[in-house]
Every structure is written in C-alpha cells, then in structure tokens.
Amino acid sequence: MAQARKRERATVSLFPFLSVLSCVIGTLTLLIAALALGQMADTVYGDTDNSEQLEAERAQRQQELDTLAAQLEHAVGRTRRYDELTAEIQAMESARAMTARKQKGEFNRIAESRNLRNSLDNLDKRLRSLRRELHHVTEKLQSQEKALALSRITLQPSGTGRNLKPHFIECNETGVELYSGYSGISISVEKDRIADSSLLRAYLDRVAGAPNETIILLIRPAGVNVYSAVADTIKATGIKHGKMPLPGHGTIDFGLFESLWR
C-alpha cells in the first residue's frame, strides 16, 4: 500500500497585520504629542483675547483624541481576538494531529489483528491435517496390532539349552498359564496367588526333580510385572530358567518342541 502523502500544514504569518498595527500606534502617538505641544504653545504665546477660539480648538482636539483613543482600543481588541483565534487554531491543529496518530495506531492494530488471524487460520489448518494423519496412523497401528494379536506364534528351539527339556510358563496381564507338555493345554494361576499357589509350587517341584529340564517364561506385552514376580519365585527354588518375549496375543504353537521331545 502506498504511503499516504502528508498534508501540508497551513501556516499563518503575523507580519503584515502587526506591521500595520505598529504604524497606526506610532502615528497616533505622534499626533497626540503634536497636539499636546500645540496646546502648550498656544497657552504660553497666544493672545488672551482669543481664549474662546482656543477653547473651541481644544475641545475639537480633545474630540479627535477621544476618537483616536477609541480607534486604538478597537485595534487592541481586534489584536486580542486575533491572538485568541490563533490559539484556537493551534489547539485544533494539535487535536487533529493527535487524532491522526490515534487513527494510525488503530490501523496498525487492525493490520496486526488480521495478521494474527491469518496465522491462527494457518495453524488451525495444520492442526486439522496433523489430526487426520494421527488418526490414519492410529488406525493403521490398531490394524497391525489386531493382526499381530490374532496371528499364530510359533516357538523356535534355540540357544545353548537345546539339550534341556523346556517347560513353558506364560506371563500375561492376569497371571500365569502353566503348560503341561506341548499340546497347548494349560492351568491358570492369578497374579495375586503366585506367591502362595500350590499349583505353581507343585509345577516347580516336578521340574526341580528332573536335572535335564528347565523352565522358559513366555512374556506377553502386558505381562512384565507378572514375569518379575514369577522369576523371583523360581530363583528361590534354584531351577534353571530363561525368558522369551512374545510379539502379541496370538495362540502359541509348540509344534517344533513337540517334534523335538516326542
């Protein structure tokens, strides 16, 4: 936007009027002095027989002086009025300049408000876009988690303990599953009963009596706390044990172990 051209401020020159007024005042002063000197001369050197004529002249001069004084007073009054008008004009100019500054500040605030509004609109658009992306990613993750939870988990024999027959205990969110053999049949023990469960104690005693057997703890994603409790219980018995994280909640396939320890 092009910058508005500044208005030329009107100026008032006082020189012509004041010069004329000064000349008038000087002329009147000179006339008054001349009349006064004339009267003094007439009084000292005049003829006493012309007193009536002198009195008439004096009255005429006095009238002229009164007229000049009235004119002088009128001129002074006009000067005062001129000064008052000049002060009013200056006050109006100051008020107009202040109003212009206020309007300029208001225009700047309006422009800033518009810029902020545009920024907020852009941020809102970006936020909606990010929410759509987040919703899409969340749906994709949920789909993947669901597929992973439903997928079958096949356990692979590995590690240095291939000569040890493993027994599996699954650690999940609610407790443990004690697997008997490799058919997938299990006995459940709630997590609050792990420390004093007779079923878990009998299971561990049976494994502890076989020197070439071990326990593998299968850890579901939500079964970390249960794993810690079961691991502490197994350590107290001195049984060798290992751990194997499970990638989801799918059904466990022990087929490879069944064929190995048939």
Image (cartoon, helix red, strand yellow):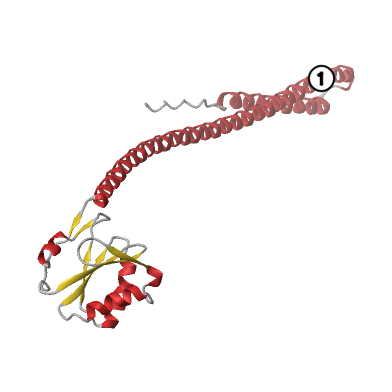
Q: Quadrant of the N terminus?
A: top left
User: Would you call the spot at circle 1 few (<14 residues within 10 Å), some (14-19), or many (20 or more)?
Assistant: few
Q: Could you tell me residue 242's position as x and y percent?
A: 20, 72
Q: Could you tell me residue 168's position as x and y percent?
A: 23, 68
Task: Identify which residue is drawn at 42% across, 26% down.
Answer: 4
- Whether residue 193 is situated above or below residue 258 in the rendered picture: below
- Whether residue 93 is situated above or below residue 151 in the rendered picture: above
Q: Quadrant of the C terminus?
A: bottom left
Left or right, residue 234 beside residue 30: left
Left or right, residue 80 beside residue 56: left
Where residue 45 sits, quadrant-wise, is top right
Left or right, residue 81 beside residue 245: right
Where residue 203 sits, quadrant-wise, is bottom left
Q: Nearer the viewer, residue 230 or 13?
A: 230
Task: Identify which residue is drawn at 28% across, 64% down.
Answer: 186
Is residue 232 something one can see in this rendering? no
Where residue 204 sits, quadrant-wise, is bottom left
Task: Identify which residue is drawn at 28% across, 61% down.
Answer: 220
Circle 1 sits on which residue? 63
Q: Nearer the viewer, residue 86 or 51?
A: 86
Q: Could you tell me residue 193's position as x and y percent?
A: 39, 72
Q: Could you tell me residue 140's position as x and y percent?
A: 27, 44
Q: Secondary structure at mark 1?
A: helix
Q: Nearer the viewer, residue 218 or 252?
A: 252
Could you tell me the amino acid type at mark 1?
Gln
Q: Nearer the viewer, residue 67 or 143?
A: 143
Is residue 56 something one can see in this rendering? yes
Residue found at the far front of this picture: 262
- Whether residue 93 is situated above or below residue 168 in the rendered picture: above
